[in-house]
Image (cartoon, helix red, strand yellow):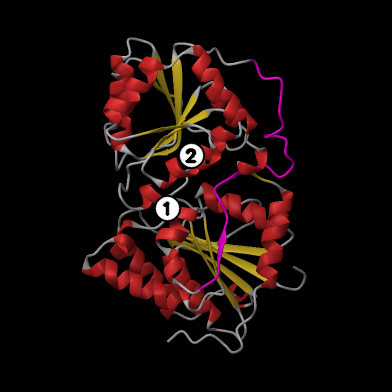
Amino acid sequence: MTGRKIIYLAHDLADAAVHKRVAMLRDGGADLAVAGFRRTPGPVRDVAGLAPVDFGRTYDGRFAQRIMAVLRHILLPLHNAALAQADVIIARNLEMLAIGARYAAARPHPVLVYESLDIHRLLLGKCVAGRLLRRIEAWLTTKAAALITSSPGFIEAYFSRYATPVRLLENKVYDPQGKIAAKKAWPPRPAGPPWKIGWSGVIRCRKSLMILADLARRSNGRIEVVIRGKPALDQIPDFHDVVSRTPGMSFGGAYKSPDDLPAIYRDVHFVWAVDFYEEGGNSALLLPNRLYEGGLFDAVPIALKTVFTGRFLERLQVGVTLAEPLRESLPRFFDTLTADGYRVLEKRAAQTPRAQWRHDKRDCLSLVDYLASLPRPVKELAYA
């Protein structure tokens, strides 16, 4: 992508998904700069080896504060020459798309790209705020040359309404050299109780926590639930209390991806690929990160049959897809699970191509080449 500079605008400079995307762009050969907000109290000084431009702090759930922060960056003069000189602007989510359109309007012939890896519940709502946000998104998306999203479910159910070209970029594990994904002489998992279910990532689904706690509690030691990652205590304030008083449930703290993935996922039989956090909305359409992390190490995913993750797994002929209510179907599955039955499930998981679960260097080059191929607008973008 010689001679074309990319600026990546991030909603949260501390977000692991932001770091992964920046690393992919960097390794794909992009001339890259990073800027955005942060959700951390202190500054984020490094994003995949780059020093970002810090727009200041915003807060989860405080939409009025975030709107005001965005408006300041739209209305005030551009404060960083490097940002104004970008040839390609990638805006990660709707609030950054508004800022990206402002930067794109400040110079001729930019390329604006909208990256949306989740669909916020307000965008799917029928309330006045939801309808207004959808109109804003529709208007801003007309200014974008392309839209990047992470699940075919998002495209089918939501983004197909827009004329903007869509590129699918799934939440695969970034493993540029293939070192993490390489098949190793792993010791076989014991095919029998206690069956271990791994739940990793951002832990924010209280309904999942209670279903798994009930399952572990009633199993009399036959089932263990191993949780790793970052619990969202604003969503599950009693998370640590629930874990500590549930026999068979444990929390191992945060982990580093991809370094810690082999140890996490080779130690469990199953991956919890169920999410009720935005039930009926984003949760019904997404493909979670842990689906790919577990898949890379032949852990068997468990998903709901009725959501996109379940349909995705059924097309791959891998994993366990269960019907609602899970409080009934999940214990029933484990009551009938045998060692031979598990070996069949594990073998199917192991036969899935590694490319289904990982991004490598070729994916980075392909992404940057795609961005380079996007047509520049015939004339300067008009913000208003």
Q: Which residue is mark 2?
A: 314
Q: Given the image, on which type of amino acid does mark 1 rest?
A: Arg
Residue 290 image position (x, y, % from top left): 50, 38
Foreground pick, 104 / 77: 104
- At x 40%, y 70%, the residue is 70
Q: Given the image, on which type of amino acid does mark 2 rest?
A: Glu
Residue 26 image position (x, y, % from top left): 69, 57
Main SS type for the magenta part? loop
**Is residue 56 one of those drawn in magenta?**
no
Q: Secondary structure at mark 1?
A: loop
Foreground pick, 368 / 240: 368
Residues in magenta? 164-187
Residue 195 shown left or right of residue 325 in the figure: right
Q: Quadrant of residue 137?
A: bottom left
Q: Which residue is mark 1?
A: 39
Dot 1, crowdedness within 10 Å: few (<14), some or many (≥20)?
some
Residue 375 image position (x, y, % from top left): 65, 78
**Is residue 176 one of those drawn in magenta?**
yes
Residue 352 shown left or right of residue 91 in the figure: right
Give the answer, above or below, for where 141 lies relative to 362: below
- At x 30%, y 50%, the residue is 280
| Of pointers 2 and 1, the one earlier in the residue sequence | 1
Give the answer, above or below, for where 102 lies relative to 31: below
